[in-house]
Amino acid sequence: MEIEIRFPGGKRVDALVGGHWISTDQPVDHGGQGSAAGPFELFLASVATCAGFYVLAFCEARKLSMAGLKMRQIVELDDKTKLPLRIQIALELPTTFPAAYRAAVVRAAEGCKVKRTLASQPSIEVIATAAEPAEAAAVRAAS
């Protein structure tokens, strides 16, 4: 998988993912325009929406109604580093949700691929390469 990044101006950084552009911006108090969610906010939202998808798939597979089911994500940040100390995903199940499935729906949410990826602590490597001059790329494309 490859994600293309563009810098459209200001503090915006946009990403092309799966044919969709995702825009990010910094809040006004960090020099941005606040025109979009920040990258860290999108990261946190990816955890919550991934868990939400697993809950949705669990309920659909068992033909359980989603009516009244709510989810919230609570993030506890370290005061010094501003990094998450704890991310809690709270499922609020309606009274009509079958008791026999309560523990199972929690396990389904815990199976989220984003959560599992974080738990596996993948290495993240940043590299820099010299850009090819535009003339060389044009000549190569013409040949």
Image: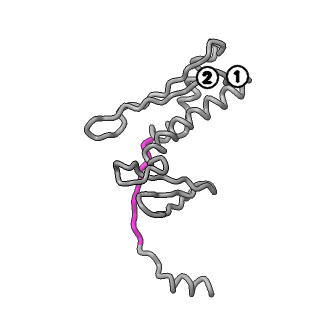
From the viewer's perspective, is 101 left or right of 42? right
Q: Is residue 117 left or right of residue 101?
A: left
Give the structural element (helix, strand or loop) at label 2: loop
In the image, residue 74 sits, relative to residue 124, either above or below, namely above
Which residue is at 41% across, 71% downward? 129
Quick check: is 125 in the magenta stretch? yes
Q: Position of residue 100 (x, y in %)?
A: 63, 13
Where, quadrant-wise, is the N terminus in this rendering?
bottom right
- Residue 91 position in % (x across, y down): 54, 23
How far across and down, in percent of the image, does residue 94 sit? 61, 16
Foreground residue, 1 or 84? 84
- The residue lying at 47 percent from left, 82 percent from top is 133
Residue situated in front as seen by the camera: 126 or 89: 89
Amino acid at the residue labelled 2: Leu
124 is higher (above) or lower (below) than 96: below
Q: How crowded is the residue under tag 1: few (<14 C-alpha within 10 Å), some, or many (20+)?
A: few
Q: Residue drawn 43% across and 53% down?
A: 33
User: Where, by quadrant of the figure, is residue 77 drawn?
Assistant: top left
Q: Compared with residue 107, is residue 53 higher up or lower down, i.e. above or below? A: below
**Label 2 sits on residue:** 69
Please identify the quadrant where the C terminus is shown.
bottom right
Instruction: Estimate the x, y position of residue 26 in percent, counting from the top left.
Output: 41, 51
Q: Name the residue under label 1.
A: 65
Give the residues in magenta: 120-129
Quadrant for residue 10, please give it.
bottom left
- The secondary structure making up most of the magenta span is loop
- Against 10, residue 94 (above or below) is above
Element assignment for label 1:
loop
